[in-house]
Image: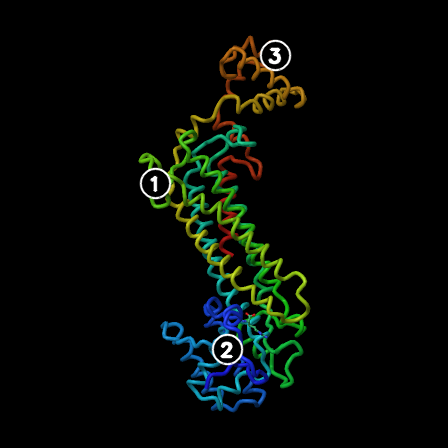
Amino acid sequence: TKRKLWGGRFTGSTDPLMHEFNQSLKYDKRMYAADVKGSIAFSKALLKAGILNEQEQKEIERGLKIVESEWAENKFVIQPDDEDIHTANERRLSEIIGKEIGGKLHTGRSRNDQVATDMRIWLMEESNQVESYLKDLLNVMVSRAEKEVDAIMPGYTHLQRAQPVRWSHLLLSHSQSFLGDLDRLRQLQPRISVLPLGSAALAGNPYSLDRELLRQELGFKSIGENSMHAVADRDFIVEWLQWASLLQIHMSRMAEDLIIYSSAEFGFVQLSDAYSTGSSIMPQKKNPDSLELLRGKAGRTFGQMAGFMMSLKGVPSTYNKDLQEDKEPLFDAVDTISAALRIAEGVIATLSINPEKMFAACTMDMLATDIADYLVRKGVPFRETHHISGQSVALAEKNKIQISDLTLDQWKELSPHFTEDVKDVFNFENSVEKRNAIGGPAREMIKRQVDIARQRIGQ
Ligand code: ARG
């Protein structure tokens, strides 16, 4: 007999398009394991409350495990009236173990607390996976930074050559953003890990179900304290989408750097073939598509976040079907992030750098600040030294030479404080090594960054 799970009070049938519109199984079936896990725990609470006896609980658990293995082995046969993963699993459970026992499982439970619980279980597990991808990316970045500490390149502001830095310092600057993402992801976990189960539809359950038992069975950190809030709350999804959007912004900014640096005009880095594609018309082309996709997908994740926040706005208290719209944005964001992190890891692990080109791109005028610093050490106030150094740049420009080629006489004309040792300023390695306060690009500070990053990743 075909009947909808909630069909008791209905006499008319659902419009076919409405049926399709309402059905979430096509995407929420990926939570089948979370749904089974939640139901097995729930059956134990029903046993403790005396709704099920031992034998019934065992039978339900056995049946649910069969349901789970059918999904896992791609053998689960979906019926037209399976509206979502919850109704599908319950329908199938009753087919396997019989309605007499199967029909008792949903006592004191609603799909409202069930779906909120499933989403949280699912997201906690996915977050762990995402965290490990993020750690893999970070480890690759940090190892490269450690290994390639010798490479000196121009640091840019406004995309104009600014001051020399180490390639490692640039790489670690992006790692710092990802370390922030790692911290934030870890901080989200306790807010995802709040148990809704036991809240039923909105008003709680009348069977004194032991929610502490449910919490322990499902490994949640805490229990939702308000049944109306527990079935309504999707803040954990909003936060996750916001988290993912920010991570994607970081990825797109790093991608943008590497895209620019991989152009022939820069030639600082070269992507491996594994993460590049060619052109259908221009045989010479090697395009950084991987990085462009990392950059482009940031827009997609941000869209999922903004879209779901709009769906949530203005939804009345407790459960309303609008909340079903939480799934596709979250699933898409999790998939996008998971792929992006692994691609980014691959790109960073396999790209090659060209330290000669990096070094060759450093021009002597990038040491103009060092000239100012030189005069500061001779007692001249910085504002004045800045001006004098600027004049040296202008003088060199006028004579079409580099500032390092100015004669001592020319220097002395600019300021009597210049002496023979001014030529020692024009050394990029020295310039970088002088910047050895915490946070600077000097070798020992790169090492410090690497060590601290490893500690944070390891936590
Ligand atoms: N498929 C629904 C969702 O994803 C499950 C909850 C349905 N609850 C309800 N009362 N119709 O939100």
User: Whole-Å distance between the Cαs marked 3 and 2?
Assistant: 84 Å
Label ID, residue 87: 2
Amino acid type shown at disc 2: Thr
Q: Residues within 10 Å of mark 3 (few under 14, many from 20)?
A: some
Amino acid type shown at disc 3: Leu
Colour mapping: rainbow
Q: Which element is circle 1 on?
A: loop
Q: Position of residue 100 (x, y in %)?
A: 49, 91
User: Whole-Å distance between the Cαs marked 2 and 1?
Assistant: 48 Å
Q: Residue at x 58, y 80 (%)?
A: 109
- Disc 1 Cβ-to-ligand 1 distance below 8 Å: no
| Residue 35, placed above or below residue 50 | above
In which of the image's four quarters is ligand 1 placed? bottom right
Dot placed on the residue nearer the N-terminal end, 3 or 2: 2
Dot 2 and dot 1 residues touching (CB under 8 Å): no
User: Whole-Å distance between the Cαs marked 1 and 3?
Assistant: 53 Å
- Find disc 3 in the rendering and name its residue: 414
| Residue 288, placed above or below residue 403 | below
| Residue 218, placed above or below residue 178 | below
- Find disc 1 in the rendering and name its residue: 278
In the figure, is residue 10 to the left or right of 291? right
Q: Residues within 10 Å of mark 2 (few under 14, many from 20)?
A: some
**For the residues carrying marks 3 and 2, which lies nearer the camera in this image?**
2
Q: Position of residue 182 (x, y in %)?
A: 53, 54
